[in-house]
Image: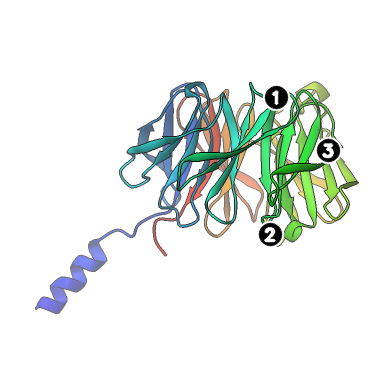
Amino acid sequence: MFRTTALALLLATPALADEIWVTNEKDNTISVIDTATLEVTRTIATGERPRGITFSADHSVVYICASDSDAVQVMDPVSGEILHDLPSGEDPEQFVLHPDNRRLYIANEDDAITTVVDTQTRRVIAQIDVGIEPEGMAVSPDGKTVITTSETTNMAHWIDTGTETIFANTLVDSRPRHAEFVKDGAELWVSAEIGGTVTVFDTSDQSEKAKLHFAIKGVHDDLIQPVGFELTPDGKTAFVALGPSNHLAVVNAETYEVEQYILVGRRVWHMAFDRDHAQLFTTNGISGDVTVVDVATRKAVKTIKVGRYPWGAAFRPTEG
Protein backbone atom coordinates (compact mmCIF):
# COMPACT_ATOMS: atom_id res chain seq x y z
CA MET A 1 0.00 0.00 0.00
CA PHE A 2 2.81 2.39 0.95
CA ARG A 3 4.67 1.69 -2.26
CA THR A 4 1.56 2.26 -4.36
CA THR A 5 0.79 5.55 -2.60
CA ALA A 6 4.39 6.74 -2.90
CA LEU A 7 4.45 5.89 -6.60
CA ALA A 8 1.18 7.73 -7.15
CA LEU A 9 2.54 10.81 -5.39
CA LEU A 10 5.72 10.67 -7.43
CA LEU A 11 3.80 10.44 -10.68
CA ALA A 12 1.47 13.24 -9.61
CA THR A 13 4.34 15.59 -8.78
CA PRO A 14 5.18 17.74 -11.82
CA ALA A 15 8.80 17.71 -12.92
CA LEU A 16 10.72 20.91 -12.41
CA ALA A 17 10.98 22.81 -15.66
CA ASP A 18 13.93 24.82 -16.90
CA GLU A 19 13.58 28.56 -17.21
CA ILE A 20 14.44 31.53 -19.41
CA TRP A 21 14.98 34.76 -17.46
CA VAL A 22 14.16 38.00 -19.30
CA THR A 23 15.00 41.52 -18.11
CA ASN A 24 12.31 44.18 -18.71
CA GLU A 25 14.11 47.52 -18.73
CA LYS A 26 11.02 49.77 -18.57
CA ASP A 27 9.22 47.79 -15.84
CA ASN A 28 12.28 47.17 -13.62
CA THR A 29 11.40 43.49 -13.52
CA ILE A 30 12.43 40.04 -14.67
CA SER A 31 9.95 37.70 -16.36
CA VAL A 32 10.64 34.00 -15.75
CA ILE A 33 9.45 31.69 -18.53
CA ASP A 34 8.87 27.96 -18.09
CA THR A 35 10.54 26.27 -21.09
CA ALA A 36 8.07 23.37 -21.02
CA THR A 37 4.77 25.26 -20.82
CA LEU A 38 6.10 28.41 -22.53
CA GLU A 39 4.32 30.54 -19.94
CA VAL A 40 5.53 33.26 -17.56
CA THR A 41 5.58 31.74 -14.07
CA ARG A 42 7.09 34.60 -12.06
CA THR A 43 7.69 38.33 -12.28
CA ILE A 44 10.51 39.56 -10.04
CA ALA A 45 11.32 43.17 -9.09
CA THR A 46 14.82 44.50 -9.78
CA GLY A 47 16.67 47.80 -9.69
CA GLU A 48 16.15 50.46 -12.32
CA ARG A 49 16.48 49.59 -16.02
CA PRO A 50 17.73 46.00 -15.89
CA ARG A 51 19.59 44.98 -19.03
CA GLY A 52 22.46 42.47 -18.96
CA ILE A 53 21.81 39.21 -17.09
CA THR A 54 23.95 36.14 -16.42
CA PHE A 55 24.10 33.27 -13.95
CA SER A 56 27.01 31.96 -11.92
CA ALA A 57 28.52 28.69 -13.12
CA ASP A 58 26.36 26.61 -10.77
CA HIS A 59 23.29 28.83 -11.30
CA SER A 60 23.09 29.50 -7.56
CA VAL A 61 22.98 33.27 -8.10
CA VAL A 62 22.01 35.55 -10.96
CA TYR A 63 23.78 38.81 -11.78
CA ILE A 64 21.72 41.70 -13.15
CA CYS A 65 22.93 44.99 -14.66
CA ALA A 66 20.58 47.56 -13.11
CA SER A 67 21.84 50.35 -15.36
CA ASP A 68 20.00 53.34 -13.89
CA SER A 69 20.69 52.15 -10.35
CA ASP A 70 24.42 52.12 -11.14
CA ALA A 71 24.64 48.64 -9.68
CA VAL A 72 25.13 45.01 -10.50
CA GLN A 73 22.61 43.20 -8.35
CA VAL A 74 23.14 39.66 -7.06
CA MET A 75 19.91 37.69 -6.69
CA ASP A 76 18.89 34.33 -5.29
CA PRO A 77 17.05 32.78 -8.27
CA VAL A 78 14.94 30.52 -6.06
CA SER A 79 13.51 33.18 -3.77
CA GLY A 80 13.95 36.18 -6.08
CA GLU A 81 15.58 38.05 -3.20
CA ILE A 82 18.31 40.56 -4.00
CA LEU A 83 21.19 39.44 -1.79
CA HIS A 84 23.47 42.45 -2.32
CA ASP A 85 24.86 44.86 -4.89
CA LEU A 86 28.32 44.78 -6.40
CA PRO A 87 30.36 47.95 -7.04
CA SER A 88 29.84 48.26 -10.76
CA GLY A 89 30.75 51.80 -11.78
CA GLU A 90 28.24 54.10 -13.47
CA ASP A 91 25.62 52.86 -15.92
CA PRO A 92 26.56 49.17 -16.22
CA GLU A 93 25.18 47.92 -19.55
CA GLN A 94 26.57 44.47 -20.17
CA PHE A 95 28.96 42.17 -18.40
CA VAL A 96 30.62 38.81 -18.72
CA LEU A 97 31.59 36.32 -16.02
CA HIS A 98 35.12 34.92 -16.28
CA PRO A 99 35.45 31.10 -16.42
CA ASP A 100 36.97 31.28 -12.92
CA ASN A 101 33.38 32.06 -11.80
CA ARG A 102 34.76 34.92 -9.77
CA ARG A 103 35.76 37.91 -11.88
CA LEU A 104 32.95 39.92 -13.44
CA TYR A 105 33.90 42.25 -16.31
CA ILE A 106 31.43 45.14 -16.61
CA ALA A 107 31.01 47.74 -19.37
CA ASN A 108 30.37 51.20 -17.89
CA GLU A 109 28.82 53.22 -20.70
CA ASP A 110 28.98 56.67 -19.08
CA ASP A 111 32.57 56.35 -17.85
CA ALA A 112 34.26 54.71 -20.86
CA ILE A 113 35.77 52.03 -18.67
CA THR A 114 35.57 48.32 -18.06
CA THR A 115 35.29 47.55 -14.35
CA VAL A 116 36.57 44.23 -13.02
CA VAL A 117 34.87 43.10 -9.81
CA ASP A 118 35.71 40.17 -7.56
CA THR A 119 32.29 38.68 -6.84
CA GLN A 120 33.50 36.95 -3.67
CA THR A 121 35.20 39.88 -1.94
CA ARG A 122 32.80 42.37 -3.62
CA ARG A 123 35.72 44.65 -4.45
CA VAL A 124 36.83 46.38 -7.63
CA ILE A 125 40.15 44.85 -8.65
CA ALA A 126 40.72 46.86 -11.85
CA GLN A 127 39.30 49.61 -14.02
CA ILE A 128 40.41 49.62 -17.65
CA ASP A 129 40.08 52.64 -19.92
CA VAL A 130 38.31 51.71 -23.14
CA GLY A 131 36.53 53.61 -25.92
CA ILE A 132 33.48 55.85 -25.66
CA GLU A 133 30.20 54.19 -24.69
CA PRO A 134 31.31 50.62 -24.03
CA GLU A 135 28.61 47.95 -24.11
CA GLY A 136 29.38 44.54 -25.62
CA MET A 137 31.39 42.08 -23.51
CA ALA A 138 32.85 38.65 -24.26
CA VAL A 139 35.35 36.27 -22.67
CA SER A 140 37.38 33.61 -24.45
CA PRO A 141 36.80 29.97 -23.44
CA ASP A 142 40.31 29.76 -21.94
CA GLY A 143 39.67 32.93 -19.93
CA LYS A 144 42.80 34.67 -21.22
CA THR A 145 41.06 37.40 -23.22
CA VAL A 146 38.09 39.67 -22.57
CA ILE A 147 36.53 41.92 -25.21
CA THR A 148 34.82 45.25 -24.66
CA THR A 149 33.14 46.95 -27.63
CA SER A 150 32.74 50.73 -27.64
CA GLU A 151 29.73 52.07 -29.51
CA THR A 152 31.04 55.54 -30.35
CA THR A 153 34.71 54.67 -30.87
CA ASN A 154 33.63 51.75 -33.11
CA MET A 155 36.23 49.38 -31.71
CA ALA A 156 36.67 46.02 -30.08
CA HIS A 157 39.20 46.29 -27.26
CA TRP A 158 41.19 43.10 -26.50
CA ILE A 159 42.02 42.79 -22.79
CA ASP A 160 44.65 40.46 -21.34
CA THR A 161 43.05 39.05 -18.18
CA GLY A 162 46.44 38.24 -16.71
CA THR A 163 47.48 41.90 -16.59
CA GLU A 164 44.01 43.52 -16.98
CA THR A 165 45.40 45.69 -19.79
CA ILE A 166 44.47 46.20 -23.46
CA PHE A 167 46.81 44.50 -25.92
CA ALA A 168 44.95 45.26 -29.18
CA ASN A 169 42.23 47.48 -30.62
CA THR A 170 40.37 46.54 -33.80
CA LEU A 171 37.99 48.71 -35.81
CA VAL A 172 34.48 47.53 -36.57
CA ASP A 173 31.54 49.18 -38.28
CA SER A 174 29.35 51.79 -36.61
CA ARG A 175 27.94 51.17 -33.12
CA PRO A 176 29.14 47.71 -32.06
CA ARG A 177 26.69 46.18 -29.61
CA HIS A 178 27.50 42.53 -28.96
CA ALA A 179 30.51 40.20 -29.09
CA GLU A 180 31.04 36.47 -28.75
CA PHE A 181 34.00 34.09 -29.01
CA VAL A 182 33.01 31.11 -31.16
CA LYS A 183 34.50 27.88 -32.50
CA ASP A 184 36.38 27.13 -29.27
CA GLY A 185 37.77 30.65 -29.22
CA ALA A 186 39.24 30.63 -32.72
CA GLU A 187 36.94 33.44 -33.86
CA LEU A 188 35.46 36.59 -32.39
CA TRP A 189 32.17 37.88 -33.81
CA VAL A 190 31.13 41.52 -33.25
CA SER A 191 27.81 43.02 -34.36
CA ALA A 192 27.57 46.61 -35.59
CA GLU A 193 24.06 47.98 -35.10
CA ILE A 194 24.21 51.07 -37.32
CA GLY A 195 26.80 49.60 -39.69
CA GLY A 196 24.40 46.72 -40.32
CA THR A 197 27.13 44.07 -40.25
CA VAL A 198 28.77 41.39 -38.15
CA THR A 199 32.57 41.27 -38.33
CA VAL A 200 34.42 37.99 -37.81
CA PHE A 201 37.98 38.17 -36.43
CA ASP A 202 40.70 35.53 -36.31
CA THR A 203 41.67 35.56 -32.64
CA SER A 204 45.20 34.32 -33.30
CA ASP A 205 46.23 37.68 -34.75
CA GLN A 206 43.08 39.87 -34.39
CA SER A 207 42.78 40.12 -38.19
CA GLU A 208 39.44 40.50 -39.95
CA LYS A 209 38.40 37.17 -41.42
CA ALA A 210 34.93 37.86 -42.81
CA LYS A 211 32.06 40.31 -42.71
CA LEU A 212 28.37 39.38 -42.69
CA HIS A 213 25.86 41.53 -44.58
CA PHE A 214 22.07 41.30 -44.47
CA ALA A 215 19.22 42.17 -46.85
CA ILE A 216 15.54 41.45 -46.25
CA LYS A 217 13.03 41.78 -49.06
CA GLY A 218 10.61 44.62 -48.35
CA VAL A 219 12.64 45.96 -45.39
CA HIS A 220 14.68 49.15 -45.71
CA ASP A 221 18.40 48.70 -45.06
CA ASP A 222 18.31 51.33 -42.28
CA LEU A 223 16.05 49.03 -40.24
CA ILE A 224 18.45 46.08 -40.43
CA GLN A 225 20.44 46.58 -37.24
CA PRO A 226 22.34 43.55 -35.88
CA VAL A 227 22.55 43.33 -32.09
CA GLY A 228 22.62 40.02 -30.18
CA PHE A 229 23.41 36.63 -31.68
CA GLU A 230 23.88 33.01 -30.63
CA LEU A 231 25.54 30.01 -32.28
CA THR A 232 24.42 26.40 -32.10
CA PRO A 233 26.72 24.10 -30.05
CA ASP A 234 28.20 22.54 -33.19
CA GLY A 235 29.30 26.00 -34.34
CA LYS A 236 27.61 25.58 -37.72
CA THR A 237 24.66 27.96 -37.44
CA ALA A 238 24.28 31.48 -36.06
CA PHE A 239 21.05 33.28 -35.25
CA VAL A 240 21.44 37.06 -35.43
CA ALA A 241 18.90 39.54 -34.02
CA LEU A 242 18.32 42.34 -36.53
CA GLY A 243 16.65 44.95 -34.31
CA PRO A 244 13.87 47.07 -35.85
CA SER A 245 13.72 44.88 -38.95
CA ASN A 246 11.85 42.48 -36.64
CA HIS A 247 13.73 39.49 -38.04
CA LEU A 248 16.38 36.97 -37.11
CA ALA A 249 18.99 36.04 -39.69
CA VAL A 250 19.99 32.39 -39.90
CA VAL A 251 23.64 32.28 -40.92
CA ASN A 252 25.84 29.41 -42.04
CA ALA A 253 28.76 29.99 -39.67
CA GLU A 254 31.16 28.05 -41.89
CA THR A 255 30.49 29.89 -45.16
CA TYR A 256 29.24 33.14 -43.53
CA GLU A 257 26.24 33.15 -45.86
CA VAL A 258 22.72 34.07 -44.74
CA GLU A 259 20.43 31.10 -45.32
CA GLN A 260 17.09 32.61 -44.33
CA TYR A 261 15.26 35.16 -42.19
CA ILE A 262 12.67 34.53 -39.48
CA LEU A 263 9.98 37.08 -38.59
CA VAL A 264 9.78 37.62 -34.82
CA GLY A 265 8.55 40.48 -32.58
CA ARG A 266 9.24 44.18 -32.88
CA ARG A 267 12.82 45.33 -32.31
CA VAL A 268 14.49 42.07 -31.42
CA TRP A 269 17.45 42.55 -29.07
CA HIS A 270 18.90 39.38 -27.60
CA MET A 271 18.18 35.69 -27.23
CA ALA A 272 18.86 32.50 -25.27
CA PHE A 273 18.63 28.78 -26.04
CA ASP A 274 16.89 26.22 -23.86
CA ARG A 275 18.78 23.25 -22.39
CA ASP A 276 18.80 21.11 -25.54
CA HIS A 277 19.21 24.05 -27.92
CA ALA A 278 15.91 22.97 -29.48
CA GLN A 279 14.20 26.28 -28.82
CA LEU A 280 15.46 29.85 -29.07
CA PHE A 281 13.84 32.65 -27.07
CA THR A 282 14.18 36.20 -28.45
CA THR A 283 13.54 39.44 -26.55
CA ASN A 284 11.46 41.90 -28.57
CA GLY A 285 11.71 45.35 -27.01
CA ILE A 286 8.97 47.36 -28.69
CA SER A 287 6.31 44.64 -28.74
CA GLY A 288 7.03 43.67 -25.14
CA ASP A 289 7.17 39.96 -25.80
CA VAL A 290 9.38 36.94 -26.41
CA THR A 291 9.29 34.89 -29.60
CA VAL A 292 9.95 31.14 -29.34
CA VAL A 293 11.75 29.76 -32.39
CA ASP A 294 11.92 26.05 -33.16
CA VAL A 295 15.59 25.58 -34.06
CA ALA A 296 15.11 22.46 -36.20
CA THR A 297 12.38 23.92 -38.42
CA ARG A 298 13.62 27.52 -38.10
CA LYS A 299 10.08 28.75 -37.49
CA ALA A 300 8.56 31.02 -34.86
CA VAL A 301 6.10 28.86 -32.91
CA LYS A 302 4.83 31.08 -30.10
CA THR A 303 4.76 34.61 -28.73
CA ILE A 304 4.93 35.11 -24.95
CA LYS A 305 3.91 38.43 -23.43
CA VAL A 306 6.40 39.72 -20.84
CA GLY A 307 7.10 43.19 -19.41
CA ARG A 308 7.83 46.48 -21.13
CA TYR A 309 10.99 46.58 -23.25
CA PRO A 310 12.43 43.11 -22.69
CA TRP A 311 16.18 43.25 -23.32
CA GLY A 312 18.42 40.51 -21.90
CA ALA A 313 17.83 36.76 -21.70
CA ALA A 314 19.54 33.91 -19.84
CA PHE A 315 18.88 30.21 -19.40
CA ARG A 316 18.50 28.60 -15.96
CA PRO A 317 18.30 24.82 -15.48
CA THR A 318 16.20 23.88 -12.49
CA GLU A 319 17.32 20.28 -12.21
CA GLY A 320 20.07 17.99 -13.41
Mark 3 or mark 1: which comes first in sequence? 1
The type of colouring in the image is rainbow
Above or below: residue 183 compared with residue 95:
below
Picture quadrant of residue 83 = top left
- Marking on residue 133: 1
Secondary-structure class at tag 3: strand
The reply to whether residue 155 is visible in this rendering is yes
Going by the numbered disc 2, the residue's amino acid type is Asp
Mark 1 or mark 2: which comes first in sequence? 1
Q: Position of residue 84 (x, y in %)?
A: 38, 37
What residue appears at the point 56 percent right and 24 percent down from the top-left corner? Answer: 90
What residue appears at the point 57 percent right and 46 percent down from the top-left corner? Answer: 272
Question: What residue did someone put label 2 on?
Answer: 142
Q: Position of residue 8 (x, y in %)?
A: 19, 69
Going by the numbered disc 3, the residue's amino acid type is Asn
Most foreground residue, 290 or 78: 78
- Marking on residue 169: 3
Q: Is there a contact, CB below 8 Å, between mark 1 and mark 2?
A: no
Using the numbered discs, state the Cα–Cα distance from disc 2 to disc 3 in whole angstroms: 20 Å
Secondary-structure class at tag 2: loop
Using the numbered discs, state the Cα–Cα distance from disc 1 to disc 2 in whole angstroms: 27 Å
Above or below: residue 290 compared with residue 202:
above
Picture quadrant of residue 301 = top right
